[in-house]
Image (tube, grey):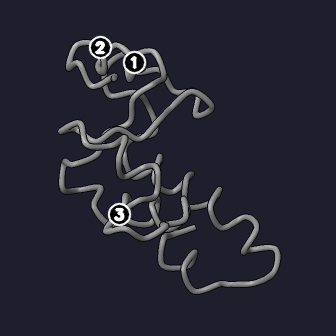
Amino acid sequence: MTPRELSTRPGTVWVRQWGARWKAAAHAALGGKCGRCGFADERALQIDHVRGDGCRESRGATHGQKVSLGTYYKHVVAQADSGRYQLLCANCNWIKRVENKEHS
Ligand SMILES: [Zn+2]
């Protein structure tokens, strides 16, 4: 299943599955495992902004508009080669936040 196929097949079931499928596509595009420790269970993997601005964007508030998770993941797939995003497991993501003092 390529991103192109995903985006050209809307449908009732697809709408419900759309976000989940884009999430899987985004994870695959980013290597499918944690960039720090190699943990590969997608249930604990999160997409991280390398420069630490992920919190704001992942909440769906980009330019004041609500963005669905599916749209967010689609964006990640498109930007996968840019180096802006990486996949981190929950542990490494949290450790990175503490190290960078991203938590508030
Ligand atoms: Zn990790």
What residue is drawn where x is 33% and y is 43%?
54
> Label 2 vs label 3: CA separation?
24 Å
Q: Which numbered circle lies on residue 36?
A: none
Evaluate if marks 1 and 2 touch, with contact meaning CB atoms under 8 Å apart.
Answer: yes
What residue is drawn where x is 41% and y is 41%?
47
Q: Is residue 76 left or right of residue 40?
A: left
Q: Is residue 50 left or right of residue 18?
A: left
Q: Secondary structure at mark 1?
A: helix
Query: Between 3 and 23, which is closer to the camera in this rendering?
Result: 23
Q: The residue under label 2 is which amino acid type?
A: Val
Q: The residue under label 3 is which amino acid type?
A: Thr
Q: The residue under label 1 is which amino acid type?
A: Trp
> Label 1 vs label 3: CA separation?
23 Å
Residue 55 image point, x, y percent? 37, 41
Q: Which residue is mark 1?
A: 94
What residue is drawn where x is 74% and y is 74%?
14
CA neighbours of label 2 inside 10 A, class few (<14), some (14 to 19), many (20+): few
Residue 5 image point, x, y percent? 56, 79
Residue 17 vs 49, above or below: the answer is: below
Q: Secondary structure at mark 3?
A: strand
Q: Is residue 36 left or right of residue 70?
A: left
Q: Report ligand 1 position as a quadrant.
A: top left
CA neighbours of label 1 inside 10 A, class few (<14), some (14 to 19), many (20+): some
Q: Which residue is mark 3?
A: 62
Q: Which residue is mark 2?
A: 98
What residue is drawn where x is 58% and y is 67%?
1
Q: Secondary structure at mark 2?
A: helix
Residue 70 image point, x, y percent? 55, 64
> Label 1 vs label 2: CA separation?
6 Å
**Which tag is nearer the camera, tag 1 or tag 3?**
3
